[in-house]
Image (tube, helix red, strand yellow):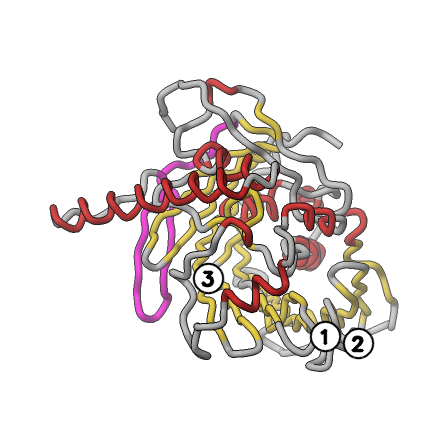
Amino acid sequence: MIKEAKVELNAVLTPPLSLESGSAADYRAPNLVQRVLSLFGNVRPGSDLSSFVVPPHFNLPKSHLQCFGESVYCIGDDLLHKCVAGKNPLERFVAVVAWSISTARPMIFGVAPFNPTLGETHHVSKGTLNVLLEQVSHRPPVTALHATDRRENVEIVWCQYAAPKFNGASVEVAVNGKRQMKLLTYGESYVLNSPKLFIRFFPVMGVDWVGNVTIQCEKSGLRAELCYGGSSFLGFRGNQRSVKGKIFNSASLKTIYEINGHWDRTITVRDVDNGKVTELYNAKDVISTLKTPMVKNPKGLWPSESAVVWNKVSQGILSKNWEKASEAKKYIEEREREMFRKRESKGETWIPKYFTLSYTKESGWECSPKQRWVPPAPIIVPSL
């Protein structure tokens, strides 16, 4: 059971990234394009940007923890219920594929969320779904997510660690780590990965999700292979936000469905046996007009809550008071460095509070939740 001191704290919560998130351009500082180019002026191609310090002019007023969590709890259509409601393994697998696609959200060129502090948390509920995230490592940055729904008997466990690299005209962010969705009623576990985030500076600026995603269920033997496409080098929109792929039996390799469409519009599945085409995913229903989370119980907020940790920086960005935002962000970053130096001088190792963190060369970083069920949160997502 999670226990934290009950202290009244201030939290700043902003609208989630959605199809309409272009309005978030209001967060950006003037002359942002020139600022972006100057920011990377002294960075060499191939450089690892995981510890790159970003001024608040380039930040969204929220942490990576919040953006990561939003992809699970900020959703229009109840795709989790559809996963559980499937009448057979194939129906449930198809629903999980649709849910996986829903986690891709439109990003905004030139601005990025805050890098979470070590031990930072984010705890939010939507209906009976309770979601908890914790920054379990800082060097390298590793984020853990645990979500449970007792009514639907669903558990989600993710471990995510991004590896951004600067390539001269672009930044490629590999989103590493294993993602699992467990439909406990059926004893089915679905393992999946994430596409890469591709940020292009030349010749046309933009942000896309690209690369290959696999989804598999060992119990049913079903597997999906998806390819996310971005716009061409010259900026043509032919493949922008496209998704193509198939669902097949991993034992026989027989294709059951072909997948085609765009993750920000609609995606269809075609039954290869009879040629019937049906809609798999509709972005307008799922990631459009999303509700902003709100604090239901201020006394239940933790000091480590992401929306509390960054509240002064977020306030400065929202009011375009860049001096206030810079001072608040500098304070947080210097405090982090001081705490790191103290642990290092004492030979102490950081131990996450809500997850067990492990690493192997074969599997990379993995996170296991310390509790069976995530409790209801003080922050909730209002009903649609």
Q: Type of residue at label 1?
A: Ser
Which is nearer the N-term, disc 2 or disc 3?
3
| Mark-to-mark CA distance, 2 and 3 | 27 Å
Which is nearer the N-term, disc 3 or disc 1?
3
Q: Which residue is mark 3?
A: 162
- Is residue 352 shown to the viewer in this render? yes
Which is nearer the N-term, disc 1 or disc 2?
1
Give the crowd class for mark 3: few <14, some 14-19, many >=20 residues within 10 Å: some
Give the tally of numbered discs: 3
Q: Type of residue at label 3?
A: Ala
- Is residue 1 shown to the viewer in this render? no
Give the residue at x 42% y 28%: 302
Q: Label 2 near label 1: C-beta < 8 Å?
A: yes
Give the residue at x 81% y 64%: 268
The picture places residue 35, in percent across and down from the top left corner, at 57, 62
| Mark-to-mark CA distance, 1 and 2 | 6 Å
| Mark-to-mark CA distance, 3 and 1 | 22 Å
Q: Type of residue at label 2?
A: Gly
